[in-house]
Structures are given as C-alpha cells and as structure tokens.
Image (spheres, grey):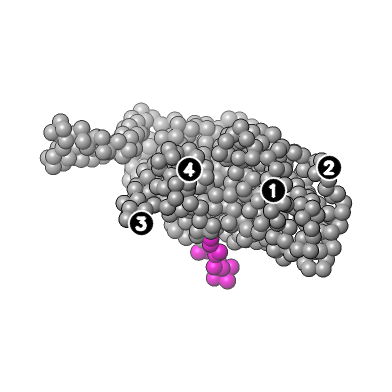
Amino acid sequence: MSLPWRCLLGPRLYRVYSGPGEQGESEMYAPNILEKFGNKIFQVIYVVQYVGMFTSPILALSLYRWEFLSLNSAIRLGTGLGLLVVVALVLRGAGRCFNPTYTTFLSTLDQAQSSPRPSLEDMRPLRRYEFDFAAWPVNFKWSDVSVDDNKARVYVERGDILVAEGGLVNRTLQLPARLAAYAITSTVGKYLMYPGCIQLLQLAIDNLLSQGREKLYKQHGGQRNKILARDGNAIDTMLVDRRNKGQYPNGKTLVVCCEGNAGFYEMGLMPTPLDAGYSVLGWNHPGFGGSTGSPYPSQEQNAVDAVMQFAIHGAGFKEENILIYGWSIGGYTSTWAAMNYPQISGLILDATFNHVLPLAVNRMPACLNSIVGLAVTSHLNLNPGDQLARYPGPVTIMRRTQDEIITTDETQLKCNCGNDLMVRLMRSRYPGLLSNHSMDVLWQWLAEPFQVSNLTEWDVDEDLCSSLLSSYITQHGESYPYSIGEEMNDEDKTKMLLYLASKYLVDVPSGHNTPLERHLFWRPWRPLTDSYIQVD
C-alpha cells in the first residue's frame, strides 16, 4: 500500500513515550497545520454526531415545524457532510505524509501488524506510541485456547429474581411495559448504570486516561494488549508482570482488577495491588476507553472470560496464582469470573452489592418501580450475590462504612448493600447455622461498624469457634455448603455465625470513591488454616 494512502487512512497518533525507566518526558505528537486542521474538522463532526444522536427526536420535530425536514434537504445535508469528510481526510493525509514522526510510526505499526499474532518483541517498539486503539494489533483471541481448555461456562441468568416494590407489571400491560423497559435501558438506563461508557465523558477525561497509561508504561513497565472476546468485542487491557523481578515477592500472584461503573484501568484499582508488589492485569469494560461494545451482562461476561483466558494462556499465570479484585459494579464480573474459575487464589469484593435492583429502584421515582424492575431483570440483571454463592473459594468483602453509592440510605449502615451480599454468602455456605435468632443477631451486628477481631461484646470465644471449625473440616472436608451447626442450639449457632462473618467482612472507614489503601489489601481468609495472608 502506498505511503499517501496509508497516511490518509492511518490511525491518529497522540504521543511518543520514552522507554520504561528512561529519563526524559514523553513527547506529544505535533501534527503540522494541514493535519491539525483535518483533525479539528473530524472532532467537530464527532461531537455534533454524538449530541445529535441524543437530541434526534427534538431535532427532527424542530426541523419538521420549520419545514426543513424533506428528502431534498436530507440529500443536501448528507452531500455537504460527505464533502467535508473528504476534505478533512485529504488535508490530514497530506499533512502526515510530510511528518517524519508519523511515517516512522506507520512503519513500526506495519511491522507489528505483519504477524498474525505479534510477539512481545514485535510489540516492544509499538508500545512506545499512543494512538487510536482501534488500530492496535490483536494480541490474544478467546479462540486461541484449545477446545479442552475452553470449557463450558456456568451462568446464573436470573438467580433469585427480585421484584420491585409496587409488584409485577399487570399482564395486559406486559408488552408495552417490556417495550418501555427496553427503550429506557438502551437510551438512559445503561448510561446511568455505567456512566463511564458515555463518550462525551471519555472525551473530557481523555488526557487523564492518557497520563494514566503513560504512568503504567513508564513507571511499572506495563504492557498494553488487545484481547478479542467471543462476541467480537476488543478489550483494552494493561498487564504489569513482576514474576521475574526479585524486589517483588508477591509478583508471582496476578491480581485481575474489575473496575467500577465509572472506572478505567488507567485511573482505577491498579495502584493498590501495584503498591503491594503484585503483578496486575487491568481491563476496561465494553464501551470504556479502547474497549468496544456496550456493558450489558452478556458482553461483560465475555469480556472478563477473555481476560481470564489471556491471564492463564496468554500471560502464563496459573489459575491458582490469580487473585480477582472487584470494585463496586465490578463485583458482577469478578464474581462471574470466580464462579467459572474456582481454582483462583481468592476473591476480594470492595464496596459491592448483592443485587443491583434495590439500588436502581431507590434512585428512580416510585411510580416507575415496575418498569425499572422489568428493565433491570430483563436487560441489566447484575446479581453478584447469586454468582458468589456458586464460588467455593476464599473471599473477602470490603464494606465502606461511609458509602454514599452502594446503600439505600447513606445515614444508616444497616442499609449498606454490602450487608445483603454478606448474608447471601453466609446462607450459601453455612445453612446449618441459620435460625431466626442467629439471623436477627447477625443483622444487628452488621448495623454497627466493627473491627474484625472485636467480638467480645457478643460473647464470642474465637479460640473455641476456630477449634470447632477445624474439627469439622478434618471430619467432613472443605466442600460447601458446610453442615456445621445443625446440632447446635441457637446461642451457639449465633456465636459461630458471627465468628465466621467476621472472617469474611472487613470494614473500611471511608466513602465509596476512596481508593483502597495498601495496608487494607488483605488476601482472603482460608478456613482450613484459619488465617489471612496480608501484604508486607
């Protein structure tokens, strides 16, 4: 392909990094006057297109009233926009042809793309460039995994269906209600639930995301990769591999970070496990950053599945050396991954919830309860609790005591939705300990902030509970659900239940958006050894 044509259709270049550990600042790519003018035209067209998409009903009505809405006017408008795009392409292409920085970048990109699956060495020169991620070579596909390793996945499509207060939609109104639910989900709902997928928001923070990628690349040796999920979505990821770096004793363990509803790996969870010395793999939800698609449950599942396959078969980490860390709405993808990869080292859920419906209903007018319930259960049924119940491994639930998001009333700790997730876990793992009395006391205990070891006021003998648990595991093994407590009286059931709950739940005295501090990044508790592993 000739150089002018490649410059005409090539990706936009933003920045040229200095190498990891090298001195000196990265250089912003400086387009010449022709390319700069062409880029500006495209930027204006993009913003007008995006705003027009959301205001199309109002815009169409206005044009109709002004008698501008006709076939001839549509043809003239389309022709004008087409000519404007052609002019912008020509100007941009001509400018790039005379810019040695861009032509060198194109040569580097062509070399990486010449291989069906570029190696680490092939990608090393290309990673010094910041450019449109759509042109990034695919580094791993879900289909790269052998049939034996690509096992059937476990799904909890509906789980325990919750019904919003106000009841089910009247049967005669179900069809219009379902249409309304679909319309609300696709036009407003998914953006309210996942504001990070709003393109104008991403445009506003684009410089911050670029700085975050640069920091991960230069300071931590991060490797950006494009992973292709089974639905065709491209997932933008960043891997920091510390296995061969002796100063990081935790480096052999990989922490897979699942971000919140407005979180990106560039400015989200990754700093916490990085500060603790782990290898870390961050990824962006479908529709976030460089990832394509939309954050609907099925696409979220495919995305995290591809990320886990890449971690195991692409990056070469053993499943038992992977720790999954989910924040807020990232609890959905992290519990789905844990349910499907049960041999992982453990699961950390930070400021997450049992089911999204109570939160959605709480933030919408009461008259829309039925429609909101239908929209959530039909299109955005995020049920981390049901998926957590299918995961048999070590878990830590981090509850933010000053949470203003994952709660139905931020002034009451008993309304924190982390409590419901905690109760869901206890129901699935220790049904023999549940009684009316023990559950009442558990809810009282959850209504107050506490320290993990502070059980004295509840008259809990931790040594005795630990001994009883060890004896049970020795006799019956570790498979859940445990039958421990079936022969106990209510008082003993309550004490054992509180003891076990205190091992899973860690209180964090901060709000929802405060990053987790390094000293609070606990490895999950293991009943067999009755111990945590905390970072050094």
Give the mark nearest the N terminus, 2 or 1.
1
> Is 414 positioned to the left or the right of 123 in the image?
right
Residue 53 got which mark?
none
Query: Dot 4, crowdedness within 10 Å: few (<14), some or many (≥20)?
Result: many
Name the residue located 54 percent from the left edge and 57 percent from the top edge: 160
In percent of width and height, residue 447 lies at 68, 40
Q: Amino acid at mark 4?
A: Val
C-alpha gap between disc 1 and disc 4:
25 Å
Name the residue located 58 percent from the left edge and 56 percent from the top edge: 386
In percent of width and height, residue 193 lies at 47, 42
Which residue was labeled with disc 4?
361
Q: Amino acid at mark 2?
A: Thr
Residue 482 lies in what quarter of the image?
bottom right
Q: Amino acid at mark 1?
A: Asp
C-alpha gap between disc 2 and disc 4:
38 Å
Residue 456 got which mark?
2
Q: Amino acid at mark 3?
A: Arg
- Observer-side mark, 2 or 1, equals 1
Q: Is residue 281 above or below residue 20?
A: below
Name the residue located 81 percent from the left edge and 64 percent from the top edge: 472
Which residue was labeled with disc 3?
171
Nearest the eye: 348 or 289 = 348
Query: Dot 2, crowdedness within 10 Å: few (<14), some or many (≥20)?
Result: few
Residue 440 got which mark?
1
Give the mark nearest the N terminus, 1 or 3.
3
C-alpha gap between disc 2 and disc 3:
53 Å
Q: Which residues are magenta?
A: 143-156
> Is 385 positioned to the left or the right of 199 in the image?
right
- For the question of whether residue 525 can be seen, the reply is no
